[in-house]
Image (cartoon, helix red, strand yellow):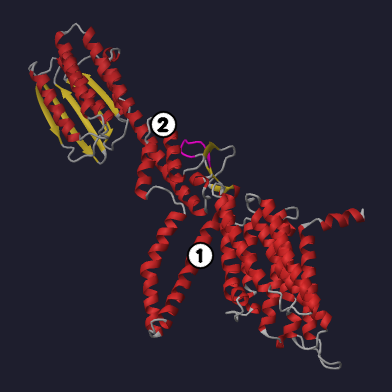
Amino acid sequence: MPQETTRHLTLTPNSRLALVLVIGLLATGLASWSVMRPAEPGQAFRSLLDVSPVYWIQILTGFGALAISGWVWALRPRDTAARLFALSGLATLTFTYAPIPFRFAQAAISEAAATSLIVMNAVGASFFGIVMVVLFINYPARLPAHRILTLAAILIFGGWTLLGLAVALSSGSFSGLNLHLITVLEMLLICVAVAAQILVTDRDPKARAVAIWFGLAVLFGAGSFITLTAIPGALGRPPIVQAQYSFAFFLLIYIGVAAGLRQFRLFELGDWAYRILFYVAGAVLLLVLDGVLVSLISLEPASAFGLSLLAVALVYLPLRDLIGRRLLPKPGLKEDELFLSVVDIAFGTSDRDRHARWRALLDKLFSPLEISTGSQAVAEPELAEDGVALHLPERAGHPGLVLRYPWQGRALFSPRHVAMVRQLVELMARAEESRQAYDRGVAEERGRIARDMHDNIGAQLLGALHSGDRERKDVMIRETLTDLRDIINNASTPGLDLDETLADLRVETADRLASVGITLDWQNTIGQAPDLSTSSTHALRSIVREAVSNTIRHSGASQLAVRLSREGDLARLEITDDGKGYDIDAQKRGNGLSNMQTRATGLAGTLEMNSGDTGTRITLDFALSPREVRP
């Protein structure tokens, strides 16, 4: 049982990382001891606080490289790229720690120890270059003829280093070992391998993002070391930056390669790489122009810097934006075009048409190689597969979708694309709500027209068809034509003006009564009133018409009085004639009075009818606030 527990612990990422850190701490302790130990017996140990800052640069570079590469290996121990990266960290620790006793130790170093340290420095530096070359030949994609290239790099640089060391050891002099030349060629080959990776991963956005990130790390890490230290040393000239200082550039390589190997926020690596590259390139261009103007044209430093700054602002920044727009893919529509496209989608003729337009818009925005229905539901747009895929939620009647390989597989989705799609989905939902409200309004209006046609037009035409009274038939047809005209003219009107309705109704009533010799006394004191809904207007008109029809047919009256009054939001309609009256109970068995009661209920009002020897009175109380009711 204890053996199984121990075996289990050694396989955990924490235990692997602890092993790497222990190695680094032991090497750091040994290097520090060589610096602190006294030059003569009996002397006190030297404090590390008194050592040159260069010591700390080399310690930070070596230990940092080992810790970063060891962390990646601890998380991915079976991955070949992670193993190579860890070996490079060990090599960096070796060639940064090996020179420490030469530069900072107080005590004398034996010849054998010095020779061993020189060999360790040479082997570590060469081994670092070989491992990095092999890494970039095989990752993130395997270059064509990668086996041959890998073997050639190992044999050429490894053999060169070993042969040079053998000659140096046999001759007792290391002056012929041109370590700077080997380092320069290895670094140049690393740059070539990274450039080749960017080319061969053109159709693999994940690998291309990693390759671009590697390129950025190598450009600023290896490129700076080559330019400032290795090339001058290979040419036999003093380095611009001493090697002990330029070691710090290697940390940039390790940070960049670690981010690429761990694919940390992979969907943003490309954007970061281009932005950092542009900013640094602008700063370098500014310094170069300033130096050229000062040294070659002999301008004053202030004037030279001002001209350099002006040139960068007027030439480089616009050019940078142009290159950025070409290299960084962006959605292919402007904001106003997006809005119009969303409106077109929302008001498509059918669900199938709207879905097709939605897919076409996404294809136009991102040009993905694949658009498919999502197999899992998501609440909000989200990235997946390290930026290769973008999941869209089910919204506005559209199914959830998955977009893969944007811009024909040449880039990745990023958080800014997610934010843009989130706004687009919300806009789509709002447009869909507006369309549904429009559809509901259309359906309700069609229903209202159908009810009016059925309840008013159909019933009146049917009554006129079966009426044996010619006068009654004419009256019903005339009323039907009036209702039909209102339905057609006011189909899209949410409310009708009460004053106009009453004025039209007064003219119509006066004509009907005049044709049978009955005078009309019409008084309206309602005043300014809100509009009534279309159905309420029809209900009010039907009540007045039915009352007038009953007066004409049954009362024998000579005068009809109509009184309209108001008390607050409550209106009262009183219709009184001076006829002989009629039996209300007998009339209720017919349709006329029953229809009037139904209309009054539709108006949310109350209807009272009284009839006697002195005439008939009909009183209707109804609310003036507009409301949609069924007639």
Residue at (13%, 14%) from the top-left corner? 556
On the image, numbered disc 2 is attached to which residue? 353
Residue 92 point in image, percent of width and height:
71, 69
Q: Main secondary structure of the magenta part?
A: loop
Number of callouts in the render?
2
Where the C terminus falls, by quadrant?
A: top left
**Along the horizontal axis of the image, is 200 left or right of 598?**
right
Residue 473 or residue 596, whichever sits in front: 473
x and y percentages locating residue 276 in the rendered image = 51, 65
Question: Which residue is at a point 71% across and 68% down the rendered structure image?
Answer: 126
Q: Secondary structure at mark 2?
A: helix
**Dot 2, how many residues are within 10 Å of its Cα: few (below 14), some (14-19), or many (20+)?**
few
Residue 102 higher or lower than 533, as above or below: below
Q: Which mark is residue 277?
A: 1
* Relative side of 334 to 62, left or right: left
- Percent x, y of residue 418: 50, 50
**Magenta-colored span:** 395-403
Give the amino acid at mark 1.
Answer: Leu
Q: Is residue 458 visible?
A: yes
- Up the image or down, 204 lies above or below 42; here it is above
Marks 1, 2: nearer the viewer = 1
Indicate the amino acid at tag 2.
Answer: Asp
Residue 55 lies in quadrant: bottom right
Q: Is residue 290 above or below residue 548?
A: below
Query: Horizontal placement of 279 versus 312: left or right?
Result: right
**Any part of residue 29 in sight:** no
Q: Is residue 400 magenta?
A: yes
* Observer-nearest of 593 and 431: 431
